[in-house]
Amino acid sequence: MRIKLGSRNVAKVGALREVIESYALFKDAELIAIEIDSGVSPHPKSLDETVQGAINRARGSFADCDYSFGIEAGLMLVPFTKTGRMETCACAVYDGKNVYIGLSSAFEYPPVITRMILSGIEGSDAVRIAGLTDHVKLGNTEGGLIGLLTKGRVSRKEYTKQAIVNALIQLDNPDIYK
C-alpha cells in the first residue's frame, strides 16, 4: 500500500508516520511526502480556508497511491476569546472518491501574532517578528508554536496527530459510517 502526504513539513510527516503505524489498515504502508501547494493563504484565516487547504493538499497528492493525506493549520473564529480566533489543524484523507476530515484541538495565539497573521504575515514569521523565537520556520519543527506556548506539554506533532486520528474515524469504523 502507498500513502502520500501533500507536505514535507517535519511535524506533519512525523505525525502521519506515527499514526499509520498504529492502524492495521496501513500495515506495511509506504509513506511518500511530496510538497503540494495548499491553494489557500500561507496562513489560513478561517476554518473554511483551513479545511479547503487540507483537501487541496490531499487531492493534489493523490496519484499512484491508495490514500493521500492533506494537513493544514489555520485560524478559525471562536467567540469569547481575546482575539476572536483560535488555531486548529485540519486533516483530509482522500481515497480517490471520498474525503474524510478531522480536526485537532485549538489554541489561541497571543494577540500580536493573530493581528500579524490577519494582516497577511505567515505564522512562523509573525512569531519571529514578535520576538518569541529566532527560529526561521518554527512551524516546520516537531514542537511548533504550541510547543513553545505550552512549554513542551503539547507539540505540533502531537497536535497534528489528533487531526489525523479524527480524520481516520470513518475509515476505522466503516460499518457505522455507511
Image (spheres, rainbow, N blue to C red):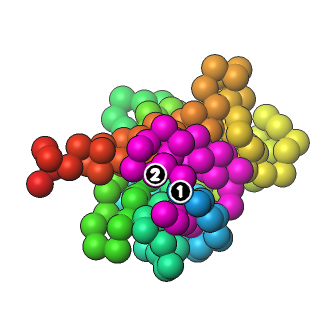
Q: Nearer the viewer, residue 132 or 63?
A: 63
Compared across the picture, whether 59 is left or right of 149 comes to left
In the image, what residue occupies the spot 63% across and 20% down?
A: 153
Query: Residue reaching furthest front?
Result: 28
- The residue to which callout 2 is attached is 26
Residue bounds of the magenta highlight: 1-28
Q: What amino acid is found at the position of numbered circle 1 in the picture? A: Ala
In the image, what residue occupies the spot 65% across and 45% down?
A: 14
Compared across the picture, whether 51 is left or right of 74 comes to left
Q: Tell me which corner region of the image, top left, top right, bottom left or bottom right, holds residue 110.
A: top right
In this picture, is 49 found above or below 130? below
Please state, as top left, top right, bottom left or bottom right, where the C terminus lies in the image.
Answer: bottom left
Q: Is residue 163 magenta?
A: no
Q: Is residue 103 visible?
A: no
Question: Which mark identifies residue 7?
Answer: none
Q: Nearer the viewer, residue 34 or 106?
A: 34
Q: Position of residue 149 (x, y in %)?
A: 67, 27
SS category of the residue bearing label 2: helix
Question: Which mark identifies residue 29?
Answer: 1
